[in-house]
Amino acid sequence: QVQLVETGGGVVQAGDSLRLSCAASERTRDYNMGWFRQAPGKEREFVAAITWNAADIYYAEPLRRRFTISRVNAKNAMYLQMNSLKPEDTAVYFCAAGAIYSTYTYSSERRYEYWGQGTQVTVSS
């Protein structure tokens, strides 16, 4: 079973940048991976996903211009670069990993079997 640990969250001001990291306990090349977030009082939502070999990348459309997902399989790691942060980006950010082949879309939580505990990102105005 893959264990995922997110780091890099914190409290920043609007307009700042943050880079989240997700470290996996085993080789990430066997999994597609993604980032989700959950704001207070809201359901968890899709942020971005990246296939096992980084050949395909998907974003929630409103975040496409500000967020960048990447991965380094040699380090068993995935990243989320977040720029021009806004107060509405405040949320707990989760990384997730799932099998390469799935009937679910990349934006569906059901595609991912393994989840981290999350890292808090707070953006003040």
Image: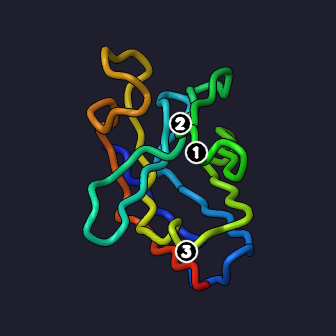
- Which sits earlier in the primary sequence, circle 1 or circle 2? 2
Q: Residue at x 65, y 38 (%)?
A: 73
Residue under the image location 49 percent in, 63 percent down:
6
**In this image, 67 relative to 111: left or right?**
right
> Is residue 62 shown above or below 116?
above
Say which amino acid is labelled 3.
Pro
Q: For the residue carrying disc 3, how many other residues have a C-alpha within 10 Å: few (<14), some (14-19), or many (20+)?
A: some
Pick the residue in front: 71 or 44.
44
Three-letter code, disc 2: Ala
Q: Which numbered disc, 3 or 2, marks the residue closer to the eye?
A: 3
CA–CA distance in space, label 3 to label 1: 14 Å
On residue 84, the disc is none
Q: Residue at x 33, y 30 (%)?
A: 111
The residue closer to the viewer here, 100 or 119, is 119
Could you say which disc has been placed on residue 87 in the image?
Answer: 3
Instruction: Please name the residue that numbered disc 2 is placed on.
Output: 49
Q: Residues within 10 Å of mark 1 (few under 14, many from 20)?
A: few
- Amino acid type at circle 1 is Pro
Q: Position of residue 49 (x, y in %)?
A: 53, 36
Location of residue 72 (image quadrant): top right
Q: Is residue 122 above or below residue 68?
A: below
Residue under label 1: 62
Which comes sooner in the sequence, label 3 or label 1?
1
**Number of numbered discs present?**
3
Q: Secondary structure at mark 2?
A: strand
Q: For marks 1 and 2, give the one nearer the viewer.
A: 1
Assess whether mark 2 and mark 3 are in contact (beta carbons under 8 angstroms).
no
